[in-house]
Amino acid sequence: MKRRNSVMIVIAALCLALFCTYSTRNSEAIAQGKASAEKITVLNPLGTPPPIKLKTMAPRLDTLDGKTIYLVDDGFIGGDNLLYEIQDWFKANHPKTTTIFKRKGGGGFDAEDPALWAEMKEKADGIIIALGH
Amino acid sequence: MGIPSVPIVISDFYQQETEKALNEGLPGLRTQWIRGPVWAKTREELRRDVIGGRNPITNQPVMQEIVEKFTKPLTAEEKRSGEIVRDKGPATFTDTEENLRKMFEEKRWTDFLPIVLPTPERVDEMLKGTSHEPDEIVGKMSPTNTGTYFEYWTYTVKDVAVNAVMAGAKPEYFPLLLAVAATGKESMSVSDNSFVAALVVNGAIRDEIGINYKVGAMGPYSHANTTIGRAWTLISINLGNCGKVGTTYMGVVGNPMNLINIVIGENEEESPWQPFSVRKGFKKNENVVSLFEGWGVLSAANWRAASWGKEMDYPKIIKDIFDQQGMLFGACAMLSPPIANFVKNAGYDTVEKFEQYLSPPMQFPGMPPGAKPNAGGAPKDPAPKGDGAAAKGPMPKMPAMSNTAILVTGGTNNNYYSIGGMRYLQSVQIDNWR
């Protein structure tokens, strides 16, 4: 009887050890993402972007000679000095081009300035705008 | 306007501005890239390094390129018109868990922590948290919150549920998440300032869903605070197209608070004052979530480390700290209940009195107290030419510091509190989304 009990205990211990080994390996496999080749389905997490309406770009100029280029500062610190330097470059390198410096109003870097837009629509042949940073 | 134009942008924004130009319908926009940043450079440095320098993207002389951008004829691609219809792609993806996780990370649909994969079963379970139809449009979100710079993406109840599942949220949190999503406020701004966002929750829902508003209130010490905050991040990334480094995220140094944001349940029960939501016009016990944005929060001990006495003048100490805050976002304080009671016992029986003490109306030269100068933005008269002229000349007018918020949260085990430059945005009801 004692011997039979001992055998049973040994068998139970072996089964437990086998189970633990399997379980540990399975856990490791799961942790490594190798648990299953089974495929599952998940949902797309994205929102929906709007359609893009393509705009035709403005026709280019044949030359800058005799043209008026507006230099527009959006108000970010230092943009004015950058444009002043561009103005000086045009004076030295394209003396037949007129440049006009303007600081955009409107209450923010990305705010509209209808008065300036109207002025440029009437007088500008081209616009250089310094945007931030 | 029909006039050829050349925007000048520093090359660090190449990815962002290229995507922006496409979204605006101008994929061929002839932007001139220069080496930045421009500000703080002298005119000599600008002349030598920027105007006389090369485009960091093409390595061609900057001014030569500007001239060509005005005079080179348009290509067929640049003349193209019409509409590009976009959608979100396939409704579902089927693969092994390992491959799906990898795909979500590669597509930057995660915060790079492990996610709960949004299976249809899990999403259906989340949808049980609301009576609203899965296909109902909840709102729209843009990385700049205004839509003037980046486009808005729209999303449904089901889209929000997918992201709530990914964050590990429970269905009982879902109405709160829908209320936040419906505001359209992103939790991470595109701004290079590395801003963060905060939610303040008032009402019985705090206990109902287990929001921690006692010890460790602002930290990741409850399932609700952590996963609600994380869900807002994933909602912003996936439903608002936020947080894509190089395009819709440009925070120079970034901010770890973007991960789960700042989720604050007010400790209404131990506060000596009216709950924040009541001060914003809601009824007591009404379930309300309020949104903030700004620089983040920091322990007040960091400012006043030397202040450690038997008797403390907390109102004065808090005012000293508030006075150091910038004007852009105003200031907020998250007071523990003991500190709030110190303040109350010092004579401030309402928050309004304390806020008035902290931030009296600003007085501008030649104007009565509280009157604000015209909010006209940058003056149109150019500053005098010369090095540093912009810094010395007239500057854009900032709004007066009118945004002061006092919140009570946290435990009663010591006299600590946090201070931040966080601006209050809005408060919304939660129960509309049950």
Image (cartoon, coloured by chain):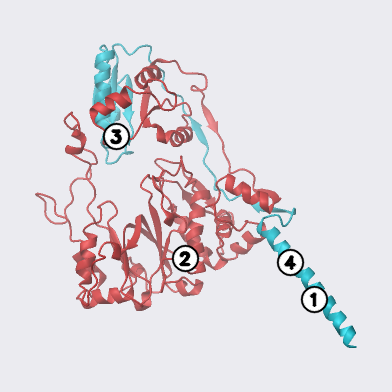
Mark 3 lies on residue: A74
Q: Quadrant of the C terminus of chain A?
A: top left
Q: Which chain is red?
A: B
Q: Quadrant of the N terminus of chain A?
A: bottom right
Q: Is residue B94 left or right of residue B202?
A: right
**Chain A pictured colour:** cyan
Estimate the x, y position of residue B197 in percent, counting from the top left.
Answer: 40, 56
Q: Which amino acid type is shown beneath numbered disc 3?
A: Asp
Q: Residues within 10 Å of mark 3 (few under 14, many from 20)?
A: many
Q: Is residue B167 left or right of residue B44?
A: right
* Residue B165 against residue A14 in the figure, above or below: above
Dot 1 falls on which chain?
Answer: A
Mark 4 lies on residue: A23
- Gap between marks 3 and 2, in whole Å? 42 Å
User: Is residue A103 visible from the viewing direction of this image?
Assistant: no
Q: Which amino acid type is shown beneath numbered disc 2?
A: Pro
Q: Residues within 10 Å of mark 1 (few under 14, many from 20)?
A: few
- Mark nearer the N terminus (1 vs 3): 1
**Which one is nearer the viewer's eye here, A19 or B222?**
A19
Q: Residues within 10 Å of mark 2 (few under 14, many from 20)?
A: some
- Gap between marks 1 and 3, in whole Å? 79 Å
Q: Is residue B217 left or right of residue B44?
A: right
Q: Quadrant of residue B84?
A: top right
Is disc 2 placed on a helix, strand or loop?
loop
